[in-house]
Image (spheres, rainbow, N blue to C red):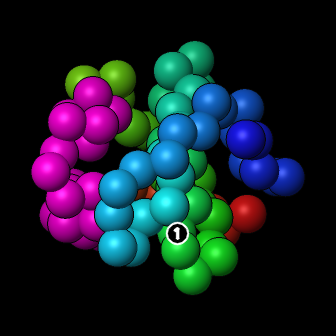
């Protein structure tokens, strides 16, 4: 799914209590995160390596809190 207002990104469901779906646009280096509470955010300047690390993380919410929030610019969409 691609969310209205978000970057073009192939979204994938994840097993997380906080995060519903993640997606990535490698051309723009934008991470798209859809949360279970309904919020959808674009996080900018996320490298392909960072996205791969997120995909492999056991806890998606914890990884985002430690590596993205407070470190990357973002926009709610």
Q: Position of residue 60 (x, y in %)?
A: 27, 56
Q: Quadrant of the C terminus?
A: bottom right
Q: Quadrant of the N terminus?
A: top right
Identity of the residue furthest to the bottom in this view:
37
Q: Nearer the viewer, residue 47 or 15?
A: 15
Q: What secondary structure characterizes most of the magenta part? A: helix
Residue 63 within the magenta-colored segment of the rendering = yes
Tell me where residue 47 sits by quadrant: top left
Snapshot quadrant of residue 65: bottom left
- Please tell me whether mark 1 sits on a helix, a strand or a loop: strand
Q: Position of residue 73 (x, y in %)?
A: 47, 58
Disc 1: CA contacts within 10 A as few (<14), some (14-19) or many (>=20): some
From what the image shows, is residue 36 above or below residue 46? Answer: below
- Magenta segment boundaries in residue numbering: 50-70
Which residue extends farthest front?
15
Q: Is residue 30 visible?
A: no
Q: Which residue is mark 1?
A: 35
């Amino acid at each position: 799914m691609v969310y209205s207002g978000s970057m073009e990104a192939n979204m994938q469901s994840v097993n997380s209590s906080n995060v519903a779906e993640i997606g990535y646009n490698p051309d723009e280096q934008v991470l798209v995160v859809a949360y279970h509470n309904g919020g959808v955010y674009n996080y900018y300047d996320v490298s392909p390596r960072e996205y791969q690390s997120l995909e492999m993380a056991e806890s998606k919410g914890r990884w985002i809190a430690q590596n993205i929030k407070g470190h990357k610019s973002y926009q709610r969409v």
